Image (cartoon, grey):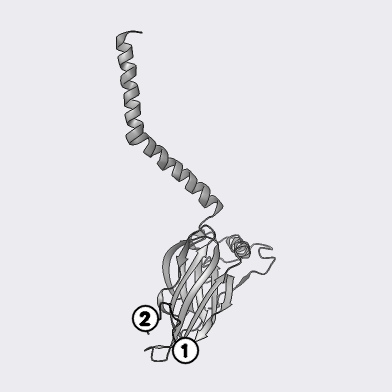
């Protein structure tokens, strides 16, 4: 082999080494991480990109602080401060199938100057059943295809607390006709407002107190 060819090979090797050290491995790591993320999301998909926090009654005002964990290790904040009515306040979120809920909420007096009652709950959610209900909702409608409106709704009614999932299909605006035999287990129920359909992922009762629970978000405020 001539000296020129040796020099070219050596320069090529040096170039490849420098490229790998400073650029190549970062490109590889980036695309590998995207691949792993896609695999993860395929196994643990995002089911809701919208969060709601509200109450059953338009006349009851609540302060809500809540966090729901999902089966993929993340979760979403579903407590949006002072709320009333259904579905209540909204925010953008990204959450998978829920597995645990921790929430504190207070019921305001008629003048909305202070809270008369305080509630809290810290409980597991049956994630396997929740997934079945979410899957049923996602394949329920015959013509409604707006899966981007997957919504997780935290709704309180005095000491009662609910976690709903809905695709926000409203019969006044959309074709909400169900498929044949789309809900053999009876998971789909009317939304609290009477408009639209939801599945109930969690229903529980909070511990009640006339004073703030120590260590909660209400403890230092009131």
* Quadrant housing the C terminus: bottom left
Q: Pick the residue in front: 123 or 45.
A: 123
Tell me the residue that label 1 is attached to: 210
Tell me the residue that label 2 is attached to: 220
| Residue at screen point 32% across, 24% down | 14
Q: Residues within 10 Å of mark 1 (few under 14, many from 20)?
A: few
Which of marks 2 and 1 precedes in the sequence? 1
Residue 53 in the image: state x and y as whole percent: 46, 74
Q: Which mark is residue 198?
A: none
Residue 27 in the image: state x and y as whole percent: 38, 38
For numbered disc 2, what is the local secondary structure? Answer: loop
* Quadrant housing the N terminus: top left
Q: From this viewpoint, is residue 7 visible?
A: yes
For numbered disc 1, what is the local secondary structure? Answer: loop
Query: Extreme bottom residue here?
Result: 110
109 vs 49: above or below: below
């Amino acid at each position: 082999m001539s000296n020129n060819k040796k020099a070219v090979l050596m320069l090529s090797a040096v170039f490849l080494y420098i490229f790998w050290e400073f650029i190549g491995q970062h490109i590889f790591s980036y695309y590998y991480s995207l691949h792993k993320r896609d695999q993860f999301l395929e196994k643990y998909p995002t089911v809701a990109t919208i969060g709601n926090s509200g109450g059953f009654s338009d006349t009851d005002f609540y302060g809500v602080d809540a966090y729901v964990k999902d089966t993929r290790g993340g979760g979403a904040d579903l407590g949006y401060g002072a709320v009333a009515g259904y579905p209540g306040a909204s925010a953008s979120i990204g959450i998978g199938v829920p597995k645990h809920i921790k929430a504190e909420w207070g019921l305001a007096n008629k003048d909305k100057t202070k809270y008369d009652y305080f509630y809290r709950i810290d409980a597991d959610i049956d994630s396997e059943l929740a997934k079945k209900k979410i899957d049923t909702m996602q394949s329920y409608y015959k013509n409604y295809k707006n899966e981007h409106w997957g919504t997780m709704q935290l709704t309180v009614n005095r000491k009662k607390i609910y976690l709903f999932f809905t695709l926000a299909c409203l019969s006044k605006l959309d074709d909400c006709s169900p498929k044949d035999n789309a809900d053999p287990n009876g998971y789909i129920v009317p939304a609290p407002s009477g408009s639209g359909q939801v599945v109930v992922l969690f229903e529980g009762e909070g511990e009640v107190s006339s004073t703030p629970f120590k260590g909660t978000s209400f403890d230092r405020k009131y």
